[in-house]
Image (spheres, coloured by chain):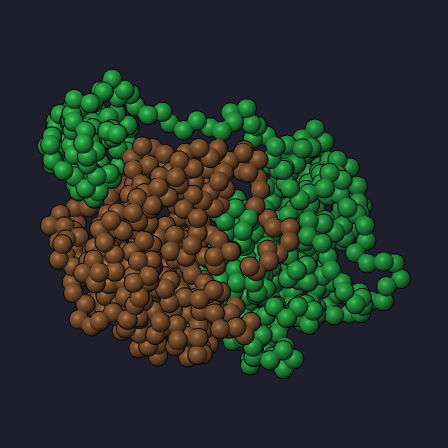
Amino acid sequence: MAAKKSTKKPNVSADELKAYYKDMLLIRRFEEKAGQLYGMGLIGGFCHLYIGQEAVVVGLEAAAKEGDKRITSYRDHGHMLACGMDPNGVMAELTGREGGYSKGKGGSMHMFSKEKHFYGGHGIVAAQVPLGAGLAFADKYNGNDNVTFTYFGDGAANQGQVYEAYNMAEIWDLPCIFVIENNQYAMGTSTQRSTHSTSYWERGAAYGIEGEEVDGMDVLAVKEAGEKAVAHCRAGNGPYILEIKTYRYRGHSMSDPAKYRTREEVQKMRDERDPIEAVRNMLLTGKHATEDDLKAIDKEIKKVVNDSAEFAKESPEPHLDELWTDIYATEVPQEA
Amino acid sequence: MATEILMPALSPTMEEGTLAKWLVKEGDTVSSGDIMAEIETDKATMEFEAVDEGVMGKILIAEGTEGVKVNTAIAVLLEEGESADDIDTAKSEPASAPVPADKEQSSETAPAAGMSHPEPDVSPDWPEGTTLKQQTVREALRDGMSEEMRRDESVFLMGEEVAEYQGAYKISQGMLDEFGPKRVIDTPITEHGFAGIGVGAAFGGLRPIVEFMTFNFAMQAIDHIINSAAKTLYMSGGQMGAPMVFRGPNGAAARVGAQHSQDYAAWYMQIPGLKVAMPYSASDYKGLMKTAIRDPNPVIFLENEILYGRSFDVPELDDYTVPFGKARIWREGDDVTIVSFGIGMSYALQAAEKLAEDGINAEVIDLRTLRPMDTPAFIKSVKKTNRLITVEEGWPQGSVGNYISSVVMQEAFDYLDAPVINITGKDVPMPYAANLEKHALLTVDEVIEAVKKVTYK
């Protein structure tokens, strides 16, 4: 397949490339499996798949260090896998089982991990944006050099609270990277139909926030931009905006008839810009890996994903007593 | 091994659909993500993608078939080296739905009120002989916040005009000087945004006090109060929550019109995950504020502008706190129980005084917190007086009094000698004109009249 050729030599080792390939493939296969389990009725309600957008989270996680935080919307499975959360726990939450990250009480849109500094999984479009700025506020208050990756989509980018958060993040110099995952469709409404100026990152200028547009189908470009943004924030220069142009292959959620775009448009993106195929080609043409090496990785990923599905099916439903737990805390949860 | 492809459920409610069109035929190679078929539901036509790769071995359901049940095998996918002859089509029954883990479990283990005591706690708020000083609600509130900020570095105050202006209602007077701009923070006028930042900071381990200049403006931020702050502990399976306080004046002030004169007690009281305090006296403002700041949950602290300037006895104790869920009996009596909270208490107490002149002894209970609510306190009282009046400034439909009435009906029905009366504000937006505003609010006379009605006097 004809992946877009990177114009410059990637500054990345073979091992790193392989790791990105593996991490992206895990998300893709996991999401395909989730779609399958949804079709079988094992996953209910809303289920928003991340297929096509894998390079965004994998590239940015490559720029993060221990202690950095991340928060996102309801299209959150990819973010969780990319920051190292256990696929078993994620899949079991999707099936609403005891072994899930939220003991089955959160579902696809609401998972969290103190250990991995993943703060959700939020179902109200753009609510995570001020929340992310608040996480960054806490780090600044505590005087450490952590940064917070605050992810939201092009749809959320039109919400008022995003700009309230921009304004305060800038006047208070919060170490927050606002990551706009522009997949070009807010549910079924294209950016062209929903907004006059579709270059979302430029809106930061009104608040004095620097930013840039990034090719979200190129994991190395995302990583490079992520490193720049992280350096900016860690140095105490306040927030930074990354508008990452990406594409989701699947519908907004599982019940999306996808009539707002042509099948050809989706197919063209898959054929020409697939982020996983691109890295695969880099690995093969750069002789960093053989077809057999990649097959072995594919097999390994397939097993992880199948195991997670097995775990998610086998894990029991939560005990009915769980209905009444976790409504009130009796002590303050300790920061991990 | 051959893989059966099952009829997918394409929405949460889909049970069957029409297999409108096959886009692959037997013998085709498919890889994951390829569109295999179009499925029609009653709502839409949707494309169905392959998950596994392989060769299309056999199509089991022909295109155009209607009413295909979800999870019926519709085709068989072969792996490398398999042939269509290997296919055993006998096992094409719908896969079974997940079985509940334990059907015998009972959901009757609900800790219904969770935080209420079977017997009311009627111990005094401070020991006998404690020195008391007269203090305004305003000063007591500031002292409560300041003491906690001295005690815990992670506590900070944010809101509009809280720092340099010294508080729109002067609640935070002097706090900027003492704690500095890192901990007393002026925000832009963006309630939605700064409430969200406050909740995020609480997720991140801080203990924010978010001041709303008035709770009317918190409607802009109510999504963060409820969806982000109150629900996260539950949604995260107990992993993280928002230990913080949302505070500010609530209810009518004077002559500020409909948009600035609403009582939100009943709104917030409804939300599991929130705690709600609505104090009346200065000592309670102080003691409950200290408890609220220390509480590991989001607390709504509903203040009252008219009360800010009133003085009450406040105990001179080093660390005076008032527990949540413990009502205060301001006046004991045998003839009728009057339950109120917040500024409603001033109407209740004035009415009780006048009623005493007529020989009617009212027991006046200040709930102090609405969630948790000290239901045993008023149940016990009603069992003694057999009559109940509730008093609040908010609107009648879905009022706090409505809830109290239902609790009393369920738990003390046989003790009631008269219907419960809920005295509330009138069911109208607050008017501006002085005479109209006076009539929109409740009055002491209305409380007296209600008491006379239930005591048949």
Q: Which residue is found at the position 30% from the left and 70% from the top?
A: A224
Question: In this image, B366 relative to A96: left or right?
Answer: right
Tell me residue A239's x, y (percent): 39, 74
In the picture as drawn, the residue positioned furthest to the right comes out as B129
Residue B96 locus on image (x, y percent): 36, 24
Q: Quadrant of the N terminus of chain A?
A: bottom left
Tell me the shade of chain A.
Answer: brown
Residue drawn at (31%, 71%), measured in percent from left and top?
A: A225
Q: Measuring from the top left, give residue A217's x and y in whole percent.
A: 23, 61
- Residue B147 visible at all: yes
Q: Nearer the viewer, residue B80 or B242?
A: B80
Q: Position of residue B79 (x, y in %)?
A: 21, 33
Relative depth, front residue between A221 and B436 = A221
**Label total for image:** 0
Q: Residue at x 26, y 47 (%)?
A: A295
Please identify which colour was used for chain B in the image.
green
- Residue at point 26% right, 21% down? B92
Position of residue B187 in the picture relative to residue B404 (left or right): left
Residue at the farthest top position: B90
Q: Is residue A317 left or right of residue B14?
A: right
Check the image and report above or below for B438 versus A45: below
Q: Report the front residue among B219 and A217.
A: A217
Question: In terms of depth relative to the viewer, which is nearer, A171 or B91?
Answer: B91
* Figure check: A25 above or below A131: above
In the picture shown, does residue B354 fall above or below A218? above
Q: Quadrant of the C terminus of chain A?
A: bottom right
Q: Is residue B351 visible?
A: no
